[in-house]
Amino acid sequence: MALRWRGCGLALLVLLLSGIPTAPVARAAPPPETIFGVWDRAPEPGSAAMGALQALGARYVRTALNWDEVEGVPGQYRWESYDARFRALREAGLVPLVVVANAPFPGSYTPGAARCGPLTERGLAAFEQFLASAMRRYGSQAGDPSLRGAVMFWQILNEADFYLKDLTAPDGAPNALGGGCLGNTRDPYGSASPFWGPRLYAELLRRAGNAKQAADPAARIVFAALAADTCYDRTGTPLDESTYLTFNCQFFAQVIDPAIGNAGALFDIASFNWYLFHRQAHETPTAKGFLGKIERFRQVMAAFGLAKPIIVSETGLTYGAGTRPCHDPANLACVDRTADDVALLVAPTLAWSLQAARHPTMPLVAVIWFMLRSDPTSTVGEWGLIQSGVLSAAYRAFQFSVAELERTRFLADLGEPTVLAAGAAPGGSDPCLPSRGGPVRRCNTLQWLVFQDRTGAREKHVLWVDSGYHDEPHAYRYQLVAGVLVPQPVEREAGVPLSRLLRATTDTGTVLTPWRVENGWAFFRVTHRALFLELAPEHQLVLDGAGGTLELAPPPVLPGAYRAPSGPALRLEVPAGALPVGTRVSAAVADGGTIAPLGALALSCQDRDRPCYPTRPLTLTLDAGSLLSQLALSSSLPALRLHASEAAATAPPPLLRCRWPEGRCSGTISSFDLWLVVDGTQRLAIPITWRAAPP
């Protein structure tokens, strides 16, 4: 958000956190697959803040490289302070996302607009030279081994889509590059050039590309962290420029449009900021909350034939004095937010991030929490995971959530309605309730995301009740009592098989016990605070060398369930000697999406945490009488997939056999259309036979 780059005094954000207590979990360098990060001005080497950053578990650190601090005199660079910071981050295994900020000297930026205006021709040349010098110093070809590869990601501006109706009047913004101010499409300085601001930003990207080509071709140019907020009305209709409040909502499209900025090939990664305040402006019919804005940007890129990864450069929530989420004095929920309220957003945001990371062509590759340490000069509340040297509840939630999710992959979205036992709120209340402000309905919906660790030996389930509201992390329903609106937290009920349950905790690691156990199922109350459930795979077979049968049947229908779970009966027969002794074969819920719940199953086979390859045929048997309308079965032996597009509504099908590498199955199953796909080249002939069982 541009406000925090300007009003919070980014250049002054230097906190000495000598009082930070030791973090609960000591960590080495984060694993390379971690996509989570945090904003910080850059912690000083050896400081308590650096220790807290390492213990947090983040991998990425978004930070500023202030041009004016390095080049106070044209052509003279002073890198000392940044050398120390980037060297320390590199040694800690942390990856900087560097935002180039602050034009350095008069003549480099356009006068009359404070320092928020566009760069002059002289400034553009100086910018290209400066960026090339920085890439040579910190990039993959740096001469100093301690700095080589310290910086790979270079972000060109923050919130460049900032729109000022009168750009020629100083607005007090301190940054020429940090704050943007290129959202205007009409040239405020008099020329008739159309799409003035987007074209200027495209030119900045061209200069950045020149620097990359000359200094470090391995560098990655990241698009400005666009705000792109207040862009749609409540019906989802895009707003035009005459109705813009703060940002040019079409800025991204205008910059990459071949007829305007033509900059689609000039950056490597798209980027934007996401905050709870504007969630309703971005949600789509298929993507809510955090995922809505990601979906919007994917749609824009697809419209221009682009497919690039995405970074969410800022997300978070303010708390402290003056941050109450509404202005109705009769509403008891209208109290200032606390760091504990912020903690409610951490696990959902990180879980949604891993879901977005699974996109095949436009994955989310990093998400940055704003910020590590609160700015004591801020007048708009606190933002930090650390406040006045104290690790907040949000810090603990971030640390715990990263530790739980960092070695997992997204499997399924089991949100409303869910496939395991998910009941309505106590009292059977409607999860969708009228908003306090008018006819808009907000839905306190149960969110249920499933992840699997690398070995397939564990599932991590993250559940929470989402408020659906743009400034409230809590999920409430309201009752009018004696003229006063009284908020009541919404509770939902979720159940899992007791035999699979390994652990249940809150988002800060507090261990929970089921509030009731019934018919072999453990039931938990789910509120707006995220619940973490660790489960064994749905069914698992550990072989002792004699072979065995793995059976998977539909779970029982439970009284009072939100929707009765159902699915296919499945039996995997493993002959003796077909797999190494000690091999673990698992069946679990797989990718959701358009596939019906529990009609998507995954088979995984692990031999000492590595994929195992059978030496004798394995047979998978399906009970065709219980198939859902859509079915997908997948095996990681490796990535062998069998898909059924339509269920048979007639008599039981005949036998069908599929064998790799022929590619298609012989025989048919009624109206089924089945095929086999093996990833990559024909490396392995995997002798697996699939067949449908007779009645």
Image (cartoon, grey):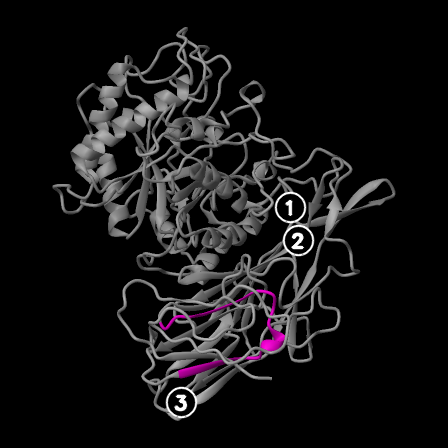
Judged from this view, the residue extending furthest toward the left is 143
Q: Is residue 353 left or right of residue 662?
A: right
**Which residue is tagged 3?**
575
Asked if 21 appears above or below 218 in the picture, the reply is: below
Q: Position of residue 675 (x, y in %)?
A: 43, 67
Residues at circles 2 and 1 in contact by the CB criterion of under 8 Å: yes
Q: Position of residue 355 (x, y in %)?
A: 48, 54
Magenta-drawn segment: 618-637
Q: Going from the N terminus, do you reach mark 3 or mark 1 first?
A: 1
Decide if residue 133 is in sight here.
yes
Tag 1 secondary structure: loop
Decide if residue 79 is in sight here.
no
| Residue 349 included in the magenta stretch of the image | no
Alpha carbon of mark 2 to alpha carbon of mark 1: how far? 8 Å
**Which residue is tagged 1?**
468
**Which residue is tagged 2?**
445
Q: Which residue type carries mark 1?
A: Gly
- State how many labels appear: 3
Residue 375 image-quadrant placement: top left
Alpha carbon of mark 2 to alpha carbon of mark 3: how far? 45 Å
The label nearer to you, 2 versus 3, is 3
